[in-house]
Amino acid sequence: MSAQEFGQWQVIYEKEGLGPDATRLRHAKALAAALQGASTRRDGKAWSALHFMNVDPWNPPVEPPVRRVSVLDQVKAQNARRRRKG
């Protein structure tokens, strides 16, 4: 497969929704549509596809970055607490 053909397939997958994310979304939409009349939510609102979109096991959510604090800032915070206590 040439690089040009590979690029064309990437565009097709993106535009046509052939990837795994699109498949999961399509399935969630079908579940929401099937349950609209058959069941009701406790709050009485309509079902949406987001209610059936679970986390992709092959693509775990990104954890937020750890906040780094310098030692100097920690010492200043400790000294400030000590001064307040008196």
Image: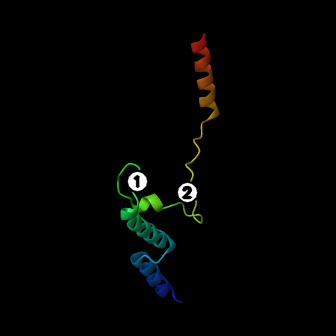
Q: Alpha-carbon neighbours of circle 2 within 10 Å: few (<14), some, or many (≥20)?
A: few
Is residue 68 or residue 51 the one in the foreground?
51
> What residue is shown at x 46% (from left), y 83% (from top)?
9
Image quadrant in which the N terminus is located: bottom right
Image quadrant in which the C terminus is located: top right
Q: Taking 38 as reference, is 1 above or below it?
A: below
| Residue where numbered disc 2 is placed | 61
| Figure quadrant of residue 49 | bottom left
Q: Taking 69 as reference, is 49 above or below it?
A: below
Q: Taking 73 as reference, is 45 above or below it?
A: below
Of discs 2 and 1, which sits in the foreground?
1
SS type, badge 2: loop
Q: Taking 41 as reference, is 56 above or below it?
A: below
- Numbered tag placed on residue 41 in the rendering: 1
Q: Alpha-carbon neighbours of circle 1 within 10 Å: few (<14), some, or many (≥20)?
A: few
> What residue is shown at x 62% (from left), y 20% (from top)?
79
> What residue is shown at x 45% (from left), y 78% (from top)?
13
SS type, badge 1: loop
- Residue 69, image x, y percentages: 60, 36
Residue at the top extreme, as displayed: 86
| Figure quadrant of residue 37 | bottom left
Alpha carbon separation for disc pair 2 and 1: 27 Å
The amino acid type found where label 1 is placed reads: Arg
- N-term mark: 2 or 1: 1
The amino acid type found where label 2 is placed reads: Pro
- Residue 29, image x, y percentages: 41, 67
- Numbered tag placed on residue 69 in the rendering: none
Number of numbered markers = 2
